[in-house]
Amino acid sequence: MADRKIRVAIVGVGNCASALVQGIYYYQKRQNLDTSGLMFEDVGGYKPWDIEIVAAWDIDARKVGKDVSEAIFSPPNCTTVFEPEVPHMGVKVRMGKVLDGYAPHMANYPPERSFVLAQEKEDELEDVVSVLKETRADVLVNYVPVGSEQAARFYAEACLRAGVSFINGMPTFIVSDPEWAKRFEAEGIPAVGDDIKSQVGATILHRTLVQLFVERGVKIDRTYQLNFGGNTDFLNMLERSRLQTKKTSKTEAVSSLIPYTLDWENIHIGPSDWVPWLKDRKIAYIRLEGRLFGDVPMYVEVKLDVEDSPNSAGSMIDAIRCCKLARDRGIGGPLYSISAYTMKHPPVQYPDWQARKMVEEFIRGERER
């Protein structure tokens, strides 16, 4: 019988990791109560509280060397604390490989809002591989900052060498890249990616509105999505040179549902600004302009206001469990169903209703991946 614990390693102990870890214990305490917030309470017999953190890496001086239970509440983390009683785990945060994971402009901001680069010896590739093997990790969750292209590939390579599943929560194209996908498939290692799509975030809301227009015969002429927030993710993204894959990921998540081409100036999706006092809140303004019967114009405008990181964790907790289920079944390579449902830039895009159906079929064993 398969091990009922899912052994998870985390790279990047930021707000998203904090929300994920808090959620494991939040739902463990409430497993016999009527609670909300889960898209799937049961994934092939795995519950949220079956997840166990066994290793972690970060590059911030206030987190490296601390137990994960303490690091998730250390600055600059600022997400909502909805489960303060996270027990000591006996898992120390290790010093990760910096590479391009630290944007130089972060040094220009107050340390309580930004990253403070630790001066510890960095783990090399063989160190990461060794830790993953020693801890018997099933899955590594990649939460390195947007724009950390080299760092993301560094940890993907470690997973391939250690036989560990890779879930790419950021927009470097790895699982959706055919060459990387072939490597994971050849090694028989399931992978999920790329770029986590929140439970009810700007991307899923925008996609839903686009799908509504398309299905109801309204021709979309132009659309935008403007996002801003106060966490380090938005501060990191002030450096526009780090945003190429992020913008591509978010734009394709929406444009993939439109059965005709919008000129580049008529579709704008991407981060706009950093507002420190918002902390982990994210605000998105979405507008669609189209033509209905008789080419008569119509407009829709929506404002979304949400705590960013718990929104992300609600999707990640399903991606982790589907990854483990695939491992139990001996399935390797990209998992198309859960990637399409929980990621902005999956290997194959599907409408969200179809992706949901595919995930349900995968969980029941009616679909391979």
Image (tube, rainbow, N blue to C red):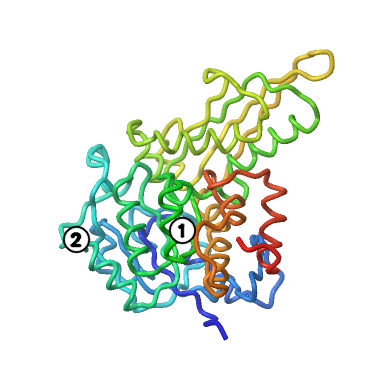
Looking at the picture, how far across and down is residue 296, in whole percent?
79, 13
Q: Which of marks 1 and 2 is in front?
A: 1
Helix, strand or loop at label 2? It is: loop
Q: Quadrant of residue 106?
A: top left
Foreground pick, 51 / 279: 51
Q: Quadrant of residue 107?
A: top left
- Residue found 60% across the figure and 50% down from its top: 340
For this view, does 311 lie left or right of residue 277?
A: right
Question: Alpha carbon of mark 1 to alpha carbon of mark 2: how far?
Answer: 22 Å
For this view, does 98 lie left or right of residue 321?
A: left
Residues at badges 1 and 2 in contact (C-beta under 8 Å)? no
Q: How crowded is mark 2: few (under 14 residues within 10 Å), some or many (20 or more)?
A: some
Q: How crowded is mark 1: few (under 14 residues within 10 Å), some or many (20 or more)?
A: many
Q: Name the residue under label 2.
A: 122
- Residue found 28% across the figure and 49% down from its top: 115
Q: Mark 1 points at which residue?
A: 167
Foreground pick, 59 / 130: 130
Q: In which quarter of the image is the N terminus?
A: bottom right
For this view, does 82 lie left or right of residue 362?
A: left
- Residue found 47% across the figure and 60% down from its top: 185
Q: In which quarter of the image is the C terminus?
A: bottom right
